Structure formats: C-alpha cells, structure tokens
C-alpha cells in the first residue's frame, strides 16, 4: 500500500489529508523504528493497518491528535521538522501547515541545546600511593 512518502521519495511527508482536517505524517513503507519513534515522541499518534491475510507490509502513519486546534496541529507539525532534519531525514511539510514562529522556536531550542557545554569528563584518578621513579 503506497503513501505520499513512498510516492515522493521522502522520509516524512506532513500534510492535511484531503476532505478532512487530519494532519498526517506519512513515512515510507518499512520505515525504521527510530523514525517512527521520533514522530511518537514529537506528539503524533501512530496508526497501523495490516493487510488482510497478513500478506505484505503493514501500513504505518502518524496523525496529529484530533483534540488539538488547527493552530496547535500546525505548530506540532512544524516543530517536528528541525529535529527530523538534524537527524538526517528528508522531510516535506505542506506550505499551508508551516508555522514560522513554531519553526523559529524549534530551531532556537536545538541551537541552545547544542551550545550548552557538555559536562567535563572526570579527570583520571590519582594513584593511591606515590610511585618512585627508578633509574637504571
């Protein structure tokens, strides 16, 4: 069963399903669990449809939660884009879903996380007793 990500050759296609107000995030057939888990983490809800007779791969897609407002769905969709790109995925989001403020906020958050210095590595422990140097 094909989907937009399969058709377009992308890792994630984010769009509103025609004749609905449902925001979809389609991934290719057989997408890695890491990608699916990222979409779960960003707040999308995972759906799976297995073909009748268990023949062929399951069709997996994500949707923005139905209880969100239109603006919240756009923000959810847009905030997912920068971290997906940073993870190396090819992402396409429909222009009508793109929220500039949410994108700026997400990129600022990524930059601030990257700029935060990592905890310094602990220094090696000093030997428990002093070692004398021997000369030959």
Image: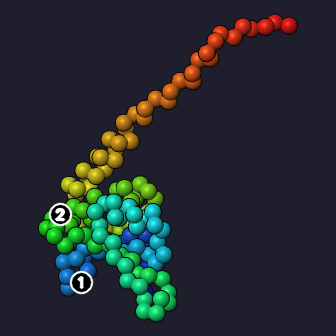
> Which residue, as the protein is rendered here, is positioned at the far front?
128
**Rendered residue at 37%/55% (across/down):** 83
Q: Nearer the viewer, residue 134 or 128?
A: 128
For residue 1, say whether it is visible: yes
Image quarter (top left, top right, bottom left or bottom right) of the N terminus: bottom left
The span from disc 1 to disc 2 (Cα, nearest Å) is 19 Å
Say if mark 1 contacts mark 2, CB within 8 Å: no
Indicate how the structure is coloured in the image: rainbow
When the figure is inspected, residue 131 is found, relative to residue 89, above or below; the finding is above
When the figure is inspected, residue 125 is found, relative to residue 132, above or below; the finding is below
Q: Using the image, tell me which numbered label, if any, was put on residue 18.
A: 1
Callout in the foreground (1, 2) = 2
Q: Position of residue 52 (x, y in %)?
A: 42, 92
**Rendered residue at 16%/67% (across/down):** 68
Residue that numbered label 2 is attached to:
72
Q: Position of residue 85 (x, y in %)?
A: 40, 58
Asked whether, in this view, residue 127 is left or right of residue 12, the answer is right
Q: Position of residue 134 (x, y in %)?
A: 79, 8
Secondary element type, mark 2: helix
Dot 1 alpha-carbon crowd within 10 angstroms: few under 14, some 14 to 19, many 20 or more:
few
Asked whether, in this view, residue 18 is left or right of residue 53, the answer is left
């Amino acid at each position: 069963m094909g989907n937009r990500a399969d058709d377009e050759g992308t890792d994630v296609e984010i769009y509103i399903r025609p004749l609905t107000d449902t925001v979809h995030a389609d991934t290719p057939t057989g997408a890695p669990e890491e990608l699916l888990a990222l979409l779960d983490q960003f707040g999308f809800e995972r759906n799976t449809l297995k073909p009748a007779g268990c023949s062929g791969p399951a069709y997996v897609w994500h949707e923005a939660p139905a209880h969100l407002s239109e603006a919240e769905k756009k923000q959810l969709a847009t905030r997912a884009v920068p971290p997906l790109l940073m993870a190396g995925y090819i992402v396409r989001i429909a222009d009508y879903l793109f929220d500039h403020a949410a994108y700026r906020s997400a990129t600022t958050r990524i930059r601030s996380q990257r700029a935060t210095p990592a905890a310094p590595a602990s220094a090696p422990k000093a030997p428990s007793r002093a070692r004398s140097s021997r000369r030959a």
